[in-house]
Structure formats: C-alpha cells, structure tokens
Amino acid sequence: MIILAATPIGNLGDASRRLIETLESAAVVAAEDTRTTAHLLRALGIENRPKLISLHDHNERERSIELVAEAAESDIVVLSDAGMPTVSDPGYHLVSLAAEQGVRVTAIPGPSAVITALAVSGLPTDRFCFEGFLPRKQGERLRMLGELSGERRTMVFFESPARLAASLADVVTVFGAERRVAVCRELTKMFEEVRRGSAAEVAEWAADGVRGEICVVVEGANTRAVSADEALAQVRSLVASGARLKDAAGEVAEQTGHSKRDLYQAALTKPSA
C-alpha cells in the first residue's frame, strides 16, 4: 500500500497524531528530499529510522516502477517537503501507476498551503482552482494569465518571492487594476502575513520586495463586469505573448461578452497606455 502523508507547511505543531504514529512504525519512506525528511523525524522526536528513498521530479517516472512493485507487498509512506504529496509536488506518476496496477493508495490528510491561503484570503471559497506556479518567463506568464482572464472561480497560485512583483504587475495588466488579490506569505509560521487589496495596491506593496513562501489568491472574473479597457488589456497581453490579434480578440470576447470586432478594432487603433 502507498500512504500519501501530509507534513507541516511551517508549524511543526500541525503534524497530526496519525502522521507521527505512521512515521514511528514506517519501514520505508519515499521522500522528496531525504535530508528534509530526516530533519522532520528528528524535529518530531521520532526515534524510528526508516529506509529513506528519494522521490523527486527528476527520478519519479523511473523510481515509481520499483516503488509500486514494493508497495504491492508492503507499505510505503510518501512525503513531500511540506504539505500533501502530488499537489505541485512529486507523487502523481507514482499514484497513477499504482492505480493502473491495482495497488492500494490511501492518504493521511493534513496541512495544505493552497487551502490555507484560500481560507484566509477573504475571497470567495465556494468555487476555486489551483494553477500551481506561474511561468518564469513573462511572455509565457502573460499567455497563461490571458487564458485565465475569463475564469470565474477564485484562483490560487504559488510564486517565488523573486518573481512576485513582476507577476503581480502582469496580473494588473491582464486582469485589471481593480481585481481583488491576496498575497499570503509564511503561512503558519512566526511571520505569517496576508496582504489584501486591489491588484494595483498589492503590486505596489510587493515592488519593495517580499520574502518567504508565497501563495497568491486572485478573485475570479465576472464577480464584477469586465470593463472595455480591461478586456482590451487582456487582448494586448495575449498578443504580446504570441497570439494572433484575431484569435486574441475572439478569445477575450468569448470570455467577457464584449464584441470581438470592437476589441479587434480598438487594439488596432487605440494606443496602448
């Protein structure tokens, strides 16, 4: 059996009793970083020293074969560095292969940066989507945001502190200055902070530099009507990332309800800010 076990995202006090009991008796642990897992065992006061096997982005496909074969005979605990394995962390290919081969997979639920950020954001929680890390390159990031410009659900992203300011500036460009945003950093840790406001306000705050582990929560579209200027900005961001103007106008028109022809003509004739 494969046991996906959620680990603390910052505060060791969030380790569940079930997690501790499982680690105290585990014979084999597949870990995203064996050094991090060894530190966690010590920090939790666990005397058991299971066999630690690395399972990370670069070896997961190959290693999953041997792990699934072993899990058919005995239990294997799977840990990421923080939070739930498979959620923007290794484990997906392992679970997929186990499901194909009929090997049981279960989970020890626990801390999740995605759910925690959503809960404290102050934005709607009834419908949401998780989009992982935003692309590093601006063109790809603008393209991704453009594709999400009509997304009505609340969106949750991970982001590097080094790229946060640039990413929030792109959110302003694509979603508009007034789109509500919450930046959640160092969740569950001593210096936890949640900065809420319009995209423009939060982008201005982030321009001075932000440290720590970061989740960005963004309001979905159409909780308020998308203005013509916001729609035009979305068209331009798609074009800047490589889309044809005709295609970009059509995509934004479908998502916002604005006229494809009007958006196309405005992009040709109205100078950008």
Image: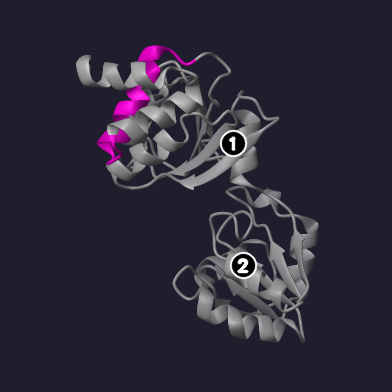
Indicate the position of residue 258 as horizontal and vertical percent values.
Answer: 44, 17
Badge 2 density bin: few <14, some 14–19, many ≥20, Cα 10 Å: few
Left or right for 3, reference 41: right
Q: Is residue 232 above or below residue 39?
A: above
Q: Which residue is mark 2?
A: 42
Q: Is residue 235 magenta?
A: yes
Colour scheme in use:
one colour
What secondary structure is the magenta-colored segment mainly?
helix
Indicate the position of residue 47 as horizontal and vertical percent values.
Answer: 70, 74
Q: Name the amino acid type tagged 2.
A: Arg
Local secondary structure at mark 2: helix
On residue 77, the disc is none
Q: Which residue is mark 1?
A: 117
Indicate the position of residue 32 as horizontal and vertical percent values.
Answer: 53, 68
The residue sitting at 39% across, 22% down in the picture is: 260
Which residues fall within the magenta stretch? Answer: 226-244
Badge 1 density bin: few <14, some 14–19, many ≥20, Cα 10 Å: many
For the question of whether residue 165 can be seen, the reply is no
Q: Name the amino acid type tagged 1.
A: Ala
Local secondary structure at mark 1: helix
Tag nearer the camera, 2 or 1: 1
Q: Is residue 6 above or below residue 185?
A: below
The residue sitting at 35% across, 14% down in the picture is: 229
Indicate the position of residue 83 as horizontal and vertical percent values.
Answer: 61, 54
The residue sitting at 47% across, 35% down in the picture is: 148
Sequence order check, earlier mark of 2 and 1: 2
The quarter of the rendered structure image containing the N terminus is bottom right
